[in-house]
Amino acid sequence: MRILLTNDDGIHAEGLEALERIARVLSDDIWVCAPEYEQSGASRSLTLDEPIRVRQMSDRRFSTTGTPTDCVMMAVTELMGGLRPDLVLSGVNRGANLAEDVTMSGTVAGAIEGMALGIPSIALSQMSWPISGQEMSTAPLYTPAEHFGPGLVRRLVAIGWPKDVVMNVNFPSRAIEAITEVEVTRQTFRDVQVRRAEKRTDTRGNAYYWMGYRPEKSRPAPGTDLAAIYDGKISVTPLHIDLTHLATVNTMRAVLGGAPPRG
């Protein structure tokens, strides 16, 4: 099995090293193409207004000045010399990609680009902050992902999934022995606002802002990605990029179909 790896934390990220170790349990045919610099929050952006530079770091290892989407597209169409991967793995992201955040995630976007190119793709993320009421593991951050990742990826590949779907996997920040369940979940939305802009002042007295998150818990429904992580489970969410809201389509057809309104 030929596996292409990417991420949004950058070519030097510890999570990418963890992903390589996961992949090498599954195959010896590993290729890596990741951003030269961190691209967290890049979503599915393409670099269109400037050239993309590529640095070949070893025989099957590349970095680019582009986004995760750029990396996967360029690896498959240019850098791998016509060899198509059988699987794309994106991650392991530092921090979970859950709920509405999946639409902004460069990690998920890397997997989506693989899917768009007809390749089964999985995004993997590691929760990086403790959940209230749970004792966080004292082991290295990516230990849960590395411990459970190979078996879970192997099982997902064996099961298979539709061509227009990517798998979004999130690992809780708990000790290995405390992680006892995988749950197949649906994406949810938080009922609290956790994104924030923190205003600061530079040495010349000018304002600037850091975008970030508050580690505040939501109250998610059972069966959702957030609920699974809050319960210390591994969350596996099948995602697709068809954003059509079918219930509204059916409602609107009844009142808006036909000739366009005038005036």
Image (cartoon, rainbow, N blue to C red):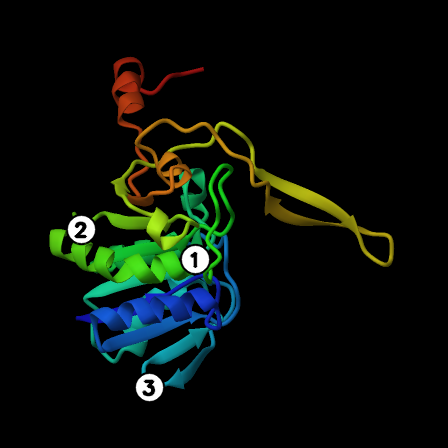
Q: Quadrant of residue 60?
A: bottom left
Give the residue at mark 3.
Answer: 59
Label 3 neighbour load within 10 Å: few <14, some 14-19, many 20+: few
Q: Looking at the rendering, which quadrant does residue 248 occupy?
A: top left
34 to 246, vertically: above or below:
below
Which of the two residues, 256 or 104, is positioned nearer the viewer here? 104
Q: Name, please, the residue furthest toward the right.
A: 204
Q: Determine the secondary structure under disc 1.
A: strand
- On residue 64, which mark appears? none
- Residue 93 has which mark? 1
- Up-down relation of residue 154 to residue 104 (above or below): below
Task: Check the image and name the residue furthest to the bottom.
Answer: 59
Q: Tell me which numbered mark, 2 or 1, is placed earlier along the sequence.
A: 1
Instruction: Say which label, 3 or 1, has the lower sequence index.
Output: 3
Q: Is residue 211 left or right of residue 92?
A: right
Kind of residue indicated by mark 2: Lys
Give the x, y percent position of residue 77: 28, 71
- Quadrant where the N terminus sits is bottom left
Label 2 vs label 1: CA separation? 23 Å
Which of these two is toward me, 247 or 33?
Answer: 33
Q: Is residue 207 above or below residue 30?
A: above
Helix, strand or loop at mark 3:
loop
**To which residue does mark 2 refer?**
163
